[in-house]
């Protein structure tokens, strides 16, 4: 079976070289079987009927219409953790940038060009305007203890900070990776009340929009420093501007600048550099490519944001069914196979919110007419036979 892959952004060759000769990859593939994307906006795109999967080389999927894709039976994958170290390193940089007035100091020092022998004396005379506190011994609040938040929390502990973590959705696996000295709070208000620095590492969604808003900032210590390398919308612009003007906040480092925030005193604006390392680009491309290949060739799903993880090792014909998460569907599907005299050797079914995936290992020939019967079952979105 030959597959067409469309790339919407430049994808690291380390990922692209994982596709065998059965794949043709181009940025203008028509009616592709899968799309690889980094940050290209996909909300206004129309998807072809062949499109089975989208691989996002990165963590955030807010550039992709994830729900619309689920309705059309398009599995959207991301690459959780693949760029976590890159973002962690920028978060530590951001902590220091928020403290030591480094950006302003650099601009000022460069402005001394042309002062000849005076430069040394001017440096010593002018440096006091850039004094800023050390981070050791201070308290860092980490909101979101996923792949990135955990690395940031542990690294900050290693730098001598006291770390408070907040994550109502913390998984057991992730809990085990957190340095035991990180104090976890169940009420975010306790984090706001104690942190000298706050860094946000949650995905953007309607529920997380404005995590740092006027109400949150009012609960913070005076002079709090806010770091946002996750998504711009997580911090309310008007609230942070007003906090910086009143002195409630003393710095805001953001990887998502916009016109409103640029030029505001105390804002350090970076051009979305979190994952901009060659290592992260390679890791994300490799993970996204592996996810797409395993889904196209085997029907296995891992790290999808709109369908559950499913995996099966088949000895017969593998059938992959994407469907809505409704009662009695499995009974109707197995009835189709039974009525056609086909035996189901093995089956996995899992759900993620409103959607489910079922993988079956079936002995015998799964004909087009059986596929049509499966497609006709109410709530079935897509059926694929993988031989
Ligand atoms: C992510 O979502 O993975 C990071 O913001 C970097 C990126 O957008 O590629």
Image (spheres, grey):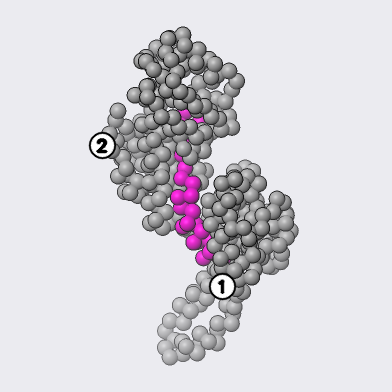
Q: Is residue 252 left or right of residue 313?
A: right
- Residues in magenta? 68-95
Instruction: State the image coordinates of residue 86 (x, y, percent, origin top left).
Output: 46, 57
Instruction: State the image coordinates of residue 199 (x, y, percent, origin top left).
Output: 60, 58
Q: Secondary structure at mark 2?
A: loop
Q: Is residue 175 visible?
A: yes
Ligand 1 within 8 A of label 2's CB? no
Asked whether 91 falls inside the magenta stretch, the response is yes
Front residue of 93 and 346:
346
Which residue in the structure is indicated by mark 2? Answer: 21
Instruction: State the image coordinates of residue 327 (x, y, percent, origin top left).
Output: 60, 20
Answer yes or no: do the residues labelled 1 and 2 have beta carbons within 8 Å?
A: no
Q: Is residue 280 left or right of residue 28?
A: right
Q: Residue at x 37, y 24 (%)?
A: 315
Which label number is shown at residue 101?
1
Which label number is shown at residue 140?
none
Seen in the picture, residue 261 relative to 325 is either above or below; the reply is: below
Q: Residue at x 55, y 30 (%)?
A: 351
Q: Is residue 97 left or right of residue 225?
A: left
Residue 364 quadrant? top left
How busy is the neighbourhood of tag 1: few (under 14 within 10 Å), some, or many (20 plus)?
Answer: some
Front residue of 363 and 57:
363
Nearer the camera: disc 1 or disc 2: 2
Seen in the picture, residue 94 relative to 326 is either above or below; the reply is: below
- Between the residue at mark 1 and the residue at mark 2, the CA separation in whole angstroms equals 52 Å
The quadrant of the image that shows the N terminus is: top left
Instruction: State the image coordinates of residue 183 (x, y, percent, origin top left).
Output: 66, 58
Seen in the picture, residue 69 relative to 63 is either above or below; the reply is: above
Front residue of 80 and 360:
360
Q: Is residue 261 visible?
A: no
Q: Residue at x 65, y 53 (%)?
A: 166
Front residue of 5 and 41:
5
């Amino acid at each position: 079976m030959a597959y067409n892959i469309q790339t919407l952004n430049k994808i690291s060759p380390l990922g692209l070289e994982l596709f065998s000769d059965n794949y043709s990859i181009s940025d203008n593939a028509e009616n592709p079987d899968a799309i690889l994307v980094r940050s290209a906006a996909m909300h206004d795109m129309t998807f072809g009927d062949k499109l089975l999967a989208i691989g996002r080389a990165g963590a955030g999927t807010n550039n992709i219409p994830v729900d619309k894709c689920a309705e059309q039976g398009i599995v959207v994958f991301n690459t959780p953790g693949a760029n976590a170290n890159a973002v962690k390193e920028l978060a530590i940089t951001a902590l220091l940038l928020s403290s030591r007035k480094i950006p302003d100091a650099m601009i000022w020092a460069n402005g001394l060009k042309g002062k000849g022998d005076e430069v040394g004396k001017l440096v010593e005379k002018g440096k006091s305007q850039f004094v800023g506190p050390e981070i050791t011994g201070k308290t860092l609040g980490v909101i979101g203890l996923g792949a990135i938040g955990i690395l940031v929390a542990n690294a900050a502990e290693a730098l001598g900070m006291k770390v408070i973590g907040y994550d109502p959705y913390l998984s057991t696996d992730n809990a085990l990776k957190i340095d035991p000295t990180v104090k976890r709070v169940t009420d975010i208000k306790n984090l706001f009340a104690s942190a000298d620095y706050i860094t946000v590492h949650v995905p953007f969604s309607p529920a997380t929009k404005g995590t740092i808003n006027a109400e949150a900032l009012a609960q913070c210590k005076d002079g709090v420093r806010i770091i946002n390398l996750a998504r711009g919308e997580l911090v309310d612009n008007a609230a942070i501007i007003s906090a910086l003007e009143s002195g409630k906040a003393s710095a805001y480092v953001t990887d998502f600048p916009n016109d409103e925030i640029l030029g505001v005193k105390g804002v350090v604006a970076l051009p979305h550099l979190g994952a901009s390392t060659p290592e992260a680009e390679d890791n994300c491309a490799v993970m996204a490519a592996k996810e797409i290949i395993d889904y196209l060739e085997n029907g296995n799903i891992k790290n999808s944001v709109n369908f559950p993880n499913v995996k099966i090792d088949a000895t017969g014909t593998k059938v992959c069914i994407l469907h809505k998460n409704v009662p009695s569907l499995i009974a109707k599907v197995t009835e189709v196979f039974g009525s056609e005299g086909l035996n189901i050797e093995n089956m996995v079914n899992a759900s993620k919110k409103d959607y489910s995936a079922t993988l079956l290992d079936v002995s015998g020939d799964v004909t087009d007419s059986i596929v049509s019967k499966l497609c006709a079952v109410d709530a079935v979105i897509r059926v694929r036979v993988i031989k």
